[in-house]
Image (tube, rainbow, N blue to C red):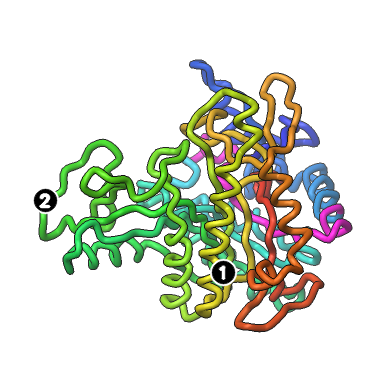
Amino acid sequence: MPVEGGYLEDGKGLSNWDVFSHIPEGCRDRSVAWGSVDAGTGGRFGEVNPGGIKFYNKVINNLLLRGIEPFVTVHHFDYPQELGDRYGAWLSPLMQEDFVLLAETCFKSFGDRVKYWATINEPNIYLQKWLVHNMLLAHAKAVKIYREQFQSKQGGSIGIIAQTHMYEPLRNVESDHQAVNRVLAFTGCCIDFIGLNHYSTLYAKDCIHSPCILGGDHFIRGFAYTTGERDGILIGEPTGVERFYVVPRGMEKIVDYISRRYNSMPIYVTENGYSAPLTKAVPDLLHDVNRIKFHKAYLAALARAIRKGANVRGYFLWTLMDNFEWAGGYSSRFGLYYVDRLTMKRTPKLSAKWFQYFLANRSSARINRLRLINGRQKSQHFGKNKRIIIARTEANATDM
């Protein structure tokens, strides 16, 4: 969900999250998104909003002036409420055409400066498979338009972002090894690169040849039961999010798996982050040593995958500032910056200072290894092969 604010400003229209935020029962206000581009009426039912285009042109230009390469997600969980009212949004195949119009508007308006496009964020997390079906068809249509009309002139690349847990067999039996393969098979599409949102690793148990009992944190996907514990022992240190455990080896394994499965296709780790077990003590939130340990361990695992040959082009830390995290609301805090919800003051955590130091001192031998692709040192200038290491924020192209 977007976090940039500006509710109904510059010609923006209502998004699904604006409506959600005004439902009673203590829901809190959120910013608008897709409706910024077309005044909230949805592609075929309205016009492009010049205010939204102007705003994001300013954002992109200022990023480039500061040496930051924009990596734009077209759709990140939000859409004009008008489309939900008209036909149920992604529940209808009509949504495909409206999404394609949004994507085409973005390519036309920003593609001369934006060289990295992700069509949709995490379509694989939805339970309704007809909804995912519409998303993947919309993705494919947007990719087709980009490749046929824009890619050769603009020189960019386009992909999709998947939520990717890594899985390990719950038992050392062949059926559980096959269950791991089934669960992992839920990733992939027609793309120039794959974006991976990776946080944790779980165990998987076969549910075809053996019984599975649901309950607690147990889910079944791909005829496999997944859980965070084995024989009463957790797979890793718990975090502030259910089913998210600290398992650094999973980063190396999932990147290696995707690299082998998709023939060394370029990979961007588009989300990776840590939320500590819930606490309201501000000093503890600011002195976030465990977040630093998390990122050090996961980056080291990513470096191992790169040394093994994975074509990793970038890493995005989740996230720049504390924000609204689904069921965790404002209690789950992934940010490098602490946000006081009463005053909205942003305060850098210890991890922000560490991350700044990490980036500023990447000439050291250890950090240089993170910037190698297939053993070759890359240019200091941004380009298609440039490795990007940056903190990600939820404000994206859908906010236009």
Q: Is residue 99 above or below residue 187?
A: above
Image quadrant occupied by the N terminus: top right
Looking at the rendering, which quadrant does residue 33 occupy?
top right
Q: Which residues are magenta?
A: 62-87
Left or right of residue 134: residue 209: left
Looking at the rendering, which quadrant does residue 104 occupy?
bottom right
The residue that label 2 is drawn on is 211
Numbered marks: total: 2
The image shows residue 86 at horizontal and vertical percentages of 52, 38
Alpha-carbon span between mark 2 and mark 1: 39 Å
Write the residue at 48% across / 41% down: 87
Residue 68 located within the stretch drawn in magenta:
yes
Residue at disc 2, secondary structure: loop
Residue at disc 1, secondary structure: helix
Look at label 2 and name its amino acid. Pro
- In this view of the protein, which residue sits in the foreground, 43 or 288? 288
Density class for disc 2 (Cα within 10 Å; few <14, some 14-19, many ≥20) is few
Q: Is residue 345 above or below residue 356?
A: above
Q: Are marks 2 and 1 in contact (CB under 8 Å)?
A: no
The image shows residue 158 at horizontal and vertical percentages of 62, 68
Write the residue at 78% across / 59% down: 360
Look at label 1 and name its amino acid. Ala
Write the residue at 58% across / 56% down: 296
Write the residue at 72% across / 33% down: 5
Residue 4 located within the stretch drawn in magenta:
no
* Residue 146 visible in rendering: no
Q: Earlier in the sequence, mark 2 or mark 1?
A: 2
The residue that label 1 is drawn on is 303
Q: Is residue 177 above or below residue 245?
A: below
Q: Residue lying furthest top in this view?
A: 25
Given this view, does label 2 or label 1 mark the residue nearer the observer? 1
The image shows residue 239 at horizontal and vertical percentages of 46, 40
